[in-house]
Amino acid sequence: MSSLIFGVKGQDGSFLAEQLLEKGEQVIGVYRRSSSQNDWRIKHLLKNPNLILVEGDITDSGSIFTLLSKFKPKYIYNLAAQSHVGSSFSQPELTWNITALGHMKLLECVRTLGLDTRIYFAASSEMYGDQYSTYENLLVGVTGAGSLAFKTQTGEYTGSRYSKPYQDENTVMNPQSPYAIAKLAAYQANKLYRNSYGLFTCSGILFNHESERRGEEFVTRKITRWLGRYMSGKSVPTLKLGNLHSKRDWGYSADYTKIMTKIIEHNEPDDFVIGTGNTITVQQFLTDAFICAGLKKDSIEFLVEVDESLKRPSEVPFLCASSLKAKKSFDIDLKDSYANMVCKMVEHDMELGKRET
């Protein structure tokens, strides 16, 4: 049995490849040519005889066609994307070409070749976007108690103006970035090829998941890398961050990639929301990371600075998953995923800080 992974050198791709190889499966890892070596996430896997690394490009139909014709994989995981939301504002066309158009080309190549394969697409909670304005637009009245009542696809929700329901598979989507729009387009194409062409296509709508393998441009890793350098005695500038009040549902990446395999192996193709069901602000993550590093939370005031230029042009204030559907279908438990994520990231980056010259 073979699995082909687009984006094998990324955070999720490396964990997924590692887990599949541990089960004795063959992994065909597709990567784009780069002027710089980017093997650090999969360096420990390179000698595994079941790992085949091949150069390919998700934006090029000819490249995809050649790969699929040669390997005819049982499973295809498309994890390739321009995955940084902030960068998508400065690179909207690149984001669209890789994230949306690339997946459409993959689907069409599978359909044209008539392959008996299953396709997993890595969707994103960013597709939900600004749920505040979404629910304000769906306002249906005021209850007797004075609370606002909202009508959603899953029924009527009653709550205060600023409390929002969890997001599930039926929540209205209101994307707020080029990245989110591209992900939503690919997600809808995935469903179209399932319903109209009979392809086995499935998606995991993954809420924020981080790890020590995340790039330093992401806020969580930016914080833990800074802590690693600071705690090792290096002279570092003030840690500059953007919006500290955004609320996210965070978990550990390796926990989520295990669920990807459950989704693609499910008896029926479907889409599943994956998250912990808890929201954490950037400020709280910052506090937890400082405490994990052995610092007092009071020190944040002197070591961290809010930089307005780092805030996104369009912000998503609140995201929180309802994974009830996934829990009914799979044996998953993510209640400790956030705490494990923080500790692993801080411990890894403090050790890395010691090793750096």
Image (cartoon, grey):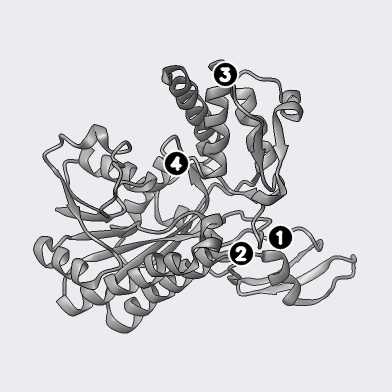
Tell which of 179 and 237 is nearer to you. Answer: 237
Q: Earlier in the sequence, mark 1 or mark 4?
A: 1
Residue identifier under label 2: 129
Callout 2: SS: loop
Residue identifier under label 3: 231
Q: Does residue 294 appear to the left or right of 4 in the view shown?
A: right
10 Å crowding of disc 3: few (<14), some (14-19), many (20+) = some
Q: How far separated are the C-alphas under marks 2 and 4?
A: 22 Å
Q: Which mark is residue 214?
A: 4
**Amino acid bearing label 2:** Gly
Tell which of 315 and 277 is nearer to you. Answer: 315
Q: Quadrant of residue 299?
A: top right
- Callout 3 touching callout 2 (CB < 8 Å): no
The answer to whether 292 is drawn above or below residue 4 in the figure is above
Q: Earlier in the sequence, mark 1 or mark 2?
A: 2
Q: Horizontal and vertical percent for residue 326? A: 45, 56
Say which residue appears at 46% left-offset and 66% top-offset.
183
Q: Does residue 51 appear to the left or right of 283 in the view shown?
A: left
10 Å crowding of disc 1: few (<14), some (14-19), many (20+) = some
Q: Quadrant of the C terminus?
A: top left
Say which residue appears at 54% left-offset and 65% top-offset.
127
Q: Quadrant of residue 18?
A: top left
The answer to whether 139 is drawn above or below residue 328 in the figure is below
Q: Horizontal and vertical percent for residue 85? A: 53, 57
- Callout 3 touching callout 1 (CB < 8 Å): no
Q: How far separated are the C-alphas under marks 3 and 4?
A: 20 Å
**Amino acid bearing label 1:** Lys
10 Å crowding of disc 2: few (<14), some (14-19), many (20+) = many
Callout 1: SS: loop
Residue identifier under label 1: 164
Say which residue appears at 33% left-offset and 78% top-offset.
193
